[in-house]
């Protein structure tokens, strides 16, 4: 059982490292949207916080903390593996920092190959659907600000996971709807 858990945990750590490196590489690509400060004002990853520019200098804190969390979990895993002082239930606790680290990037951008959302890159061919959900009094983001209360939550569904962002204007909603429709229709052909 311990060998099985070691292999599963090592695989999951590998995926998290791969996703982190992929986001860092994709951040160097040309940003198609939002590419002006006005557009960035109308899109948010978190309701109470303005969107961060998808550059290394703007996302520096998130990159450093995410890297630290990955190294911390890898070091604990290696200590547990080589010193054999942990049982397999300890490894389940190591999933907690990995789950929390996905919220470190305040990032939402459309690049040539897909979408940068938080600490993930989603290729266009992985997106199965998207929808805009109005933020009303029963919505979880309602109450953060008047701008958010009058906006929409863009929910992007992939084959396995989903991601979201907040759109605070109808003009940006129309623009994003057009971008997503164009890319999803081109992937079907």
Image: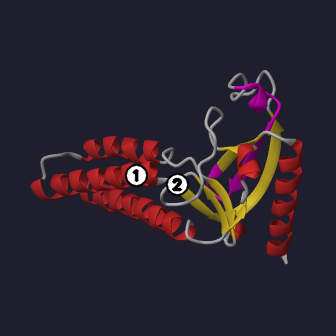
From the viewer's perspective, tell me whether residue 179 is left or right of residue 31.
right
Quick check: 17 above or below 39? below
Task: Indicate the position of residue 69 as horizontal and vertical percent values.
Answer: 34, 49
From the viewer's perspective, tell me whether residue 7 is left or right of residue 129.
left
Please report the bounds of the magenta region as a residue range: 145-162
From the viewer's perspective, tell me whether residue 141 is left or right of residue 168.
left
Cβ atoms at labels 2 and 1 below 8 Å apart: yes
Task: Indicate the position of residue 144 as horizontal and vertical percent values.
Answer: 68, 25
Question: Per the image, is 148 magenta?
Answer: yes
Q: Which residue bears the numbered disc 2?
A: 119
Q: Quadrant of residue 147?
A: top right
Question: Per the image, is 35 magenta?
Answer: no
- Seen as rendered, the residue at the extreme bottom is 189
Seen at 71% across and 22% down, the residue is 143
| Residue at disc 1, secondary structure | helix
Seen at 81% across and 26% down, the residue is 136
Q: Residues within 10 Å of mark 1 (few under 14, many from 20)?
A: many
Earlier in the chain: of badge 2 and badge 1, it is 1
Q: Which mark is residue 66?
A: 1
| Residue at disc 2, secondary structure | loop
Seen at 12% across and 47% down, the residue is 85
Q: Residues within 10 Å of mark 2 (few under 14, many from 20)?
A: many
Q: CA distance from mark 2 to mark 1?
A: 9 Å
Task: Indicate the position of residue 10 as horizontal and vertical percent values.
Answer: 33, 61
């Amino acid at each position: 059982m311990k060998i099985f858990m070691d292999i599963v945990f090592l695989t999951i750590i590998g995926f998290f490292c791969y996703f982190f490196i992929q986001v860092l590489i994709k951040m160097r690509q040309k940003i198609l949207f939002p590419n002006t400060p006005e557009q960035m004002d109308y899109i948010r990853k978190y309701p109470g916080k303005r969107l961060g520019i998808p550059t290394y200098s703007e996302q520096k804190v998130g990159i450093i903390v995410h890297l630290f969390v990955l190294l911390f979990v890898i070091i604990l895993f290696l200590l547990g593996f080589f010193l054999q002082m942990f049982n397999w239930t300890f490894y389940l606790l190591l999933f907690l920092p990995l789950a929390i680290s996905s919220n470190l990037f305040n990032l939402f951008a459309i690049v040539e190959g897909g979408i940068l959302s938080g600490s993930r890159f989603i290729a266009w061919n992985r997106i199965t659907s998207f929808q805009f959900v109005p933020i009303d009094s029963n919505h979880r983001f309602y109450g953060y600000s008047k701008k958010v209360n009058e906006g929409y939550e863009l929910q992007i569904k992939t084959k396995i996971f989903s991601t979201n962002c907040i759109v605070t204007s109808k003009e940006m909603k129309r623009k994003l709807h057009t971008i997503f429709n164009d890319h999803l229709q081109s992937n079907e052909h």
